[in-house]
Amino acid sequence: MRLPCCLLSVLLLVPAFPVLRADEGMWTFDNLPLGTLKAKYGFEPSAAWLKRLQLGTLRFPGGTGAFVSADGLVITNHHVGRGSIQQVSSGKADFVRDGFTASGRDQEVKVPGLEVMMLVATDEVTAQVNAAVPPGSSGSEALKARQNALSALKGAREKASGLTCEGVVLYQGGEYWLYSYRKFTDVRLVAAPELQVAAFGGDADNYTYPRWNLDFSLFRVYEHDRPYRPEAFLPFSARALRAGDLTLISGHPGTTSRQETLEQMRYAKEVFIPFRLKSMARLRAALEAYAATSEEAARVSADVLYGLDNSRKRLEGQLAGLARPQSLQLVEARETALREAVAKDPALRARAGESWDRISGAVADQRRLLAEYNTVDPRISVLLGFALTLARLPVEQALPSAQRLPEFTEGSLKATRDRLTNGRPILPSLDAVRLRTGLEEAQALLGRDHPYVQAMLQGRTPAEVAQAAMAGTRLQEPAYRRELLEGGAAALAASKDPLLALARAFDPFNRAIRKQWEDQVQSVLTAHGARLAEARFKVLGKSQYPDATFSLRLSFGPVATYATGSGTLAQPFTTFLGLFDRNTGWGGNPAAGPWTLPQRWLDRQDRLDLRTPFNFIYACDTVGGNSGSPVVNTQGEFVGINFDSVYEGQGGYYVYDDATKRAVATDARAILESLRKVMDAGWIADELTGR
Amino acid sequence: MRLPCCLLSVLLLVPAFPVLRADEGMWTFDNLPLGTLKAKYGFEPSAAWLKRLQLGTLRFPGGTGAFVSADGLVITNHHVGRGSIQQVSSGKADFVRDGFTASGRDQEVKVPGLEVMMLVATDEVTAQVNAAVPPGSSGSEALKARQNALSALKGAREKASGLTCEGVVLYQGGEYWLYSYRKFTDVRLVAAPELQVAAFGGDADNYTYPRWNLDFSLFRVYEHDRPYRPEAFLPFSARALRAGDLTLISGHPGTTSRQETLEQMRYAKEVFIPFRLKSMARLRAALEAYAATSEEAARVSADVLYGLDNSRKRLEGQLAGLARPQSLQLVEARETALREAVAKDPALRARAGESWDRISGAVADQRRLLAEYNTVDPRISVLLGFALTLARLPVEQALPSAQRLPEFTEGSLKATRDRLTNGRPILPSLDAVRLRTGLEEAQALLGRDHPYVQAMLQGRTPAEVAQAAMAGTRLQEPAYRRELLEGGAAALAASKDPLLALARAFDPFNRAIRKQWEDQVQSVLTAHGARLAEARFKVLGKSQYPDATFSLRLSFGPVATYATGSGTLAQPFTTFLGLFDRNTGWGGNPAAGPWTLPQRWLDRQDRLDLRTPFNFIYACDTVGGNSGSPVVNTQGEFVGINFDSVYEGQGGYYVYDDATKRAVATDARAILESLRKVMDAGWIADELTGR
């Protein structure tokens, strides 16, 4: 609670030209802030240190992991590995619920299809890519030429090297790279704790701290049916991590929007995020009322409610970040400096001088179209979405691919058809709540006289429309959807399914608003966003880090407290003591709800050294995709595994703020203590500590 | 984080006429919400139950306490008893820092001057008081007549009964009562824990939860040098308190402002609280810069900084409460209903029909005068305040008492002179920071051309003025202030103290703005606030509870979680496990800062049953003055002692909100466990549990 005042004084120092703040940045390994690390922390990583971290870090589907033993043990988050743990479970053995420990290497369980990747080489190909652009190309021609060149380079490299390659675009087109990965395809589950302790506190504790999540799972990479001996791994540290110690993490942050213009961020803050929150609150209230009608209704709506809460917390955090006066002041200062630099340079001015105004114009259109774009949207009902896809398929397939809606072009068609026929169960009574709420929202925001509202309701209430459509439909049955899909236009014409009729009414309005949005908003934001990025890269070069792109990055910062939203300073570490405090304080098992501990944790509590650190917070700049990132000390030793970042710092999606940007990790010591004392996995702990 | 949505649906149900929400209310014992207690909780306290709670509750200076044994043991908060504990400490024995446990009754330490009071009778005297108003009296004449009548009744009652009586005005004048107290003047210290564990987490944790404060101290009432055997006491409960259990607390809530008009609350939200926060942030930044200049500066400014943080957190909580849309919507709904009732009744209309508009007019003046009223204020410097009082004394004393400024009238003069000569040390270098900041604020808010600014600065900077005044003053010396006080006008005229000159420049501007404020704002708010209160009482009668007035009240509500400002649900109870988690997580002793535990707590950790509940939260409606209130279960047994309420619910000063209004108590079980296992006070625990 004290930091805002300090920030105020920091603010007075905001310079005319942008400087990075504190420990900001998700840096590529070719361009690390070595000067800052040396000046601020006296830390000078050697090339070998950096190479080991790079090779020790792995890319998981949707996240990150790391080699942590000489025999190929790999660690990632429980929530990153969860799908794999689920996959190797069976009806009899639920490893997600009950945890899993292989009793020896021969008991490790192969996860079919799981692939992890190690980044072995990065090569800049900016010159080759740019050389492929014919002189005098238009913007879109140039874009296409670059995409083709990068794709060709990637193909050639893969053929030559036998590696898996990826074209990486940094600085919104300022640089083009080829990243080459060694891919491992034999990955076996070694150990995982119970979900209840991995995600202790469930959705309620999500994005918060103090926290007690044992969010890890262990796998092993095999090659030729033998444990793989990695080129590099990150050994578990035997040094005690303390508050103030510098930490570094490597991983794959997914997406940030830190280069948006001031006008775009104002739009996010004043219009878009509040709109989404209100819309989600409306849906939530309707779903809660539905959930109260029966136990079954409560059960089937639980997942949707959790998803809404998760999104809400993230959006509220983003909004709070943008609402701090210093956030947009900083964006404005940076933008002013760039505008001045552009104005001084004739070439830049010709290329990007108008771009801010063009983007502001598009944002004005965005404001105007927002309500219609978001209400005339098939996502208001899963089953309506199926009906719409079915109804559109014959029409779209009759067109040349280039003229179709994007999801029906040749490259996307298979995925679209697959989505239609997948077997995920959908309950019409639940979907009716969504449809009704979506129609009510349209009625409220667009007005009763809007042609879309009139076409959908035809004089009835949203509840009546939803009720009638969902009572009569068979589209919840995958077999029926497949039948219609395979039957084509004739089968569709013959079907009396009420949702198909509703989808036909819906179709033209959705096409119209999508076209307006694409022409007036999206195309302008993309084209002029790229021009601004180009100008920014020309002016600032690599003194800046690129926006996150799910490519390998390094962030750094000390273990450090912060002022929480509930008014106190957060403790740098939590311990096992707090895990049991939380459980007991909620009434103990099983009344503790999301803070329920598995029985063996209660039974084995006395074996544990309860003072062992459990989770900790540190000022590394992270975002979704950093899940499972190894946290290392300056010795390059593994001290914890990153699994979350706090609510109060979610504004970092747009603007980094050193007062609130805190990542949350599971401490390496908690992992060892749990393996040894609770999880019957002493042999694994021994391997991790090199015994 | 989920509650706002539920609130949204509650909001839709706000009726045209006010109903109390959930467990709202600080009820007088003559008018308890017995219907609600029965309907909602199935609880019907008997007259004996209520009498025992009334007689078991004690009024402490600034707080509350309770008899908790047959032999007169009394419990209150550590922070309520702290002054007494300090008072009986000596240089050698610091009972605040080190705690205190009497080794037996003969070792209990008398606290000279400490008086506690037991409410033995309450008598309504509304009819007698109103009968004293002569027909045709003006508003102020009637007010005066009532005050005189109440004062006379109190005097007569004291004389007749030998008790200590107090005139109590409820419902802003709707009812007049005489409360009669038995006063105890021999009160001895029995036991208190160390400050570090009583106020664990210090200012940072203040107003927050989860919390681990062992905030209790034990005294014993004696009469005739023997332990007093009270008529009633609240025995420590042997039943386990659980989440959802109904709790009740009795105590002396100090002040609430729940009857302000919508316009007044808007002013608080939009103008006054933001103004105060900004002003405090300005002072805080200046003090922080000063504190950084030396260790001594850091030491002397620590208290002021803590005080600012405390106020800031409370005001931010109030602001957050007022900022919830449903807060002012509720106030508006209630106001609309009252306006309609007043409009329908000719007598009420004649009396209060104009009052809302008159108050709105005064609020407009308040907005206009705010900056000047708050900057031309002697509180910008302690030493300037002394100088001003000294300079004014001869002038004011020459006037008839009724014409003087209020602090110089005959009734107030002694206290004013006492404040001048008390020995609290003031450091000119610290006070210079306040003075400079105050003058800078005046310059910024009133403008450089404002006559006050010109008179104070005379062409110099605020820093120069503060520096010159503080470098040359001797007013920090109590002896010098006494000398000037005793020397009167002549000594003042002879003194060349620069602060006296500054005070003379300051004087006329302060008098002028005080007069404007009194005439245009305060007198209108008081007179028309009373008329609205009268109307409200006539319409609603005793279906409502009166605003808090530091008289005995009962509140009720279950042990219940809430959604905290950091995004999760709070655990209903904390335990000793969490106490040590917090300490260890901050790095253990002594690096743990405000979370440092006294050494004997670390040494004796293993003796404790760490699962013992420590603090808990419950939905009782409380406010400052409830400190030390006993929390009882439906058996009337003592289950905890109230010591705080959470940040998120501070809006309750204006508007009660059941989603966030949570009080915080130290659990009775934590008190017993601490007495037995750490504080060497088994004999006291035995007495408390009736062994």
Image: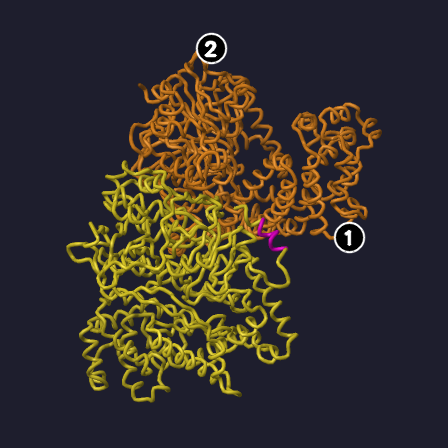
Chain colours: A yellow, B orange
Q: Nearer the viewer, residue B43 or B316?
A: B316
For disc 2, the marked residue is B224
Rendering coords of residue A564 (x, y %): 47, 48
Inspect the image, locate mark 2, and give the three-letter code of the amino acid beneath it.
Answer: His
- Quarter of the image for residue B598 reads top left
Q: Nearer the viewer, residue B547 or A170?
A: A170
Mark 1 residue crowding within 10 angstroms, few (<14) / some (14–19) / many (20+)? few
Q: Is residue B646 magenta?
A: no
In the image as oriented, which residue stretches furthest toward the left?
A92
* Mark earlier in primary sequence (2, 1): 2
Mark 2 residue crowding within 10 angstroms, few (<14) / some (14–19) / many (20+)? few
Rendering coords of residue B381 (x, y %): 69, 38
Inspect the image, locate mark 1, and give the three-letter code of the amino acid beneath it.
Answer: Asp
Q: Quadrant of the C terminus of chain A?
A: top left
Prevailing secondary structure of the magenta residues: helix
Could you tell whether B261 is left or right of A198 in the image?
right
Q: Are marks 2 and 1 in contact (CB under 8 Å)?
A: no
For disc 1, the marked residue is B449
Residue beneath the point at 72% across and 50% down? B443
